[in-house]
Image: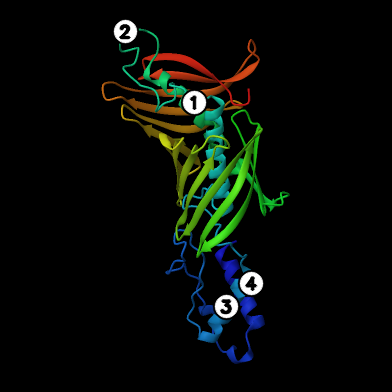
Amino acid sequence: MKKEKIEKMLREGIRDTTPDVLAAIDLETIEIKKPEKQSPFSRWKRPVFIGSLATASLALVVLFVMFLLPFEDPFTPPGNGNGVPIAFDEKEEVYTLSAFSAVSLLDRMEEGNLRHAPSFALLSSPGPSMAFTGQNAGYLIDRELDTLTQYLAVIEPIISGKDAMQFTLSESPREEYTYMMVFQSKNLRGMIIEETIHYNRIETGDDEYRLEGIMEKGATTYSVIAELEIEEDGFELELYAHHPSEEDTYIKVEQEIEEDSQTFEYEYVVRGDTVFESTLEIDFDDEEIEIELTYETATKEVEFEIIRFQEESAFRLHIEYEIDTGDFDEEGVIIVSIIYDAEEGIHKYRFAITIEDETSFARTRPYPDS
């Protein structure tokens, strides 16, 4: 709506509601300015009307505008400065998404028995790449594809963006829980992903909450417990997703949400020992979402930068990676797509890999729903 039309609406409303004693006031002097003082959510600005009227007239203007403008939930910032919606901006969404990511990782690692497998990134003993030893049996990236595959279960629905996501909050049908949140998104195949969490929420202080609940993956039920704190410029959350039968086995997530970036730090603990740590950082840049997955061990550092793009009618992931073992380093580009293996009757991830613009080859891994 144009500024002149807004001013006209305000003037007409004021004339209809202002007592006769103010008839002598020149309403044409009313000005509409941007706020000079910011709200507690300082990065998300809201309109403030400032005029040169007397106190009584100013109060009427403020009251009129309060009824004119829609109410905004302080937990729902309207977006970031680039016009890109903040993907997870309500406390219920923050909790649900962290629970989904932790349970997905725990479930995928359990499914692949990676708690005991030496091929898992941290538990492996990555010596020199076979390519560098003269044995044409693989490259540094070959040692990381299993780990990358585990995280794609989390990355796919997140990188789809806010438009592909839906959070539905309702009363839980389970007697022991108050709330039920259903999270829906899409994977690279365009299929709906749906997860449900049942939980209770306890306010433990000013803008501080404890959330206790469960999330089911197939026949397995995982408990999820979180401490959530709402800050002036975002959220901080610490969540634990526990394995149902393995003692002292869980994934801990520390999630931090700011205006244009969100960070998930994961710690995977097996029987009380930390076996793997990683970080997912989500950056919002104009209309593009970029996810950076990083982890390191005593012998290597690994970094993946992931962007989703559309090619013809299919979505793919463009990944740039760097691996540094101290003795050797390797960098390249991976295009991730979904293919159907008719011989085996399953879908697979296809990793088309190019190393330093020189060597190209492909690898595959089973797709999660196969």
Q: CA distance from mark 2 to mark 1?
A: 29 Å
Left or right: residue 47 compared with residue 345 = left
- Quarter of the image with the N terminus in it: bottom right
Q: Residue furthest right?
A: 173
Percent of width and height locating residue 86: 52, 49
Q: Which residue is mark 1?
A: 114
Asked if the residue at tag 3 contacts the one at tag 4, i.e. Cβ–Cβ closer than 8 Å, the answer is: no
Asked if the residue at tag 4 contacts the one at tag 2, i.e. Cβ–Cβ closer than 8 Å, the answer is: no
Q: Residue at x 50, y 47 (%)?
A: 239
N-term mark: 3 or 1: 3
Q: CA distance from mark 3 to mark 2?
A: 79 Å
N-term mark: 3 or 2: 3
Q: Depth-wise, is mark 3 or mark 1 nearer the camera?
A: 1
Q: CA distance from mark 4 to mark 3?
A: 10 Å
Q: Depth-wise, is mark 2 or mark 4 nearer the camera?
A: 2
Q: Residue furthest top?
A: 135
- The numbered dot on residue 61 is 3
* Amino acid type, residue under disc 2 in the picture: Gly
Q: Which residue is mark 4?
A: 67
Percent of width and height locating residue 179: 66, 53
**Can the viewer see residue 199?**
yes
Q: Depth-wise, is mark 4 or mark 1 nearer the camera?
A: 1
Q: CA distance from mark 2 to mark 4?
A: 75 Å
* Amino acid type, residue under disc 1 in the picture: Leu
Left or right: residue 36 compared with residue 88 = left
Left or right: residue 102 compared with residue 219 = left
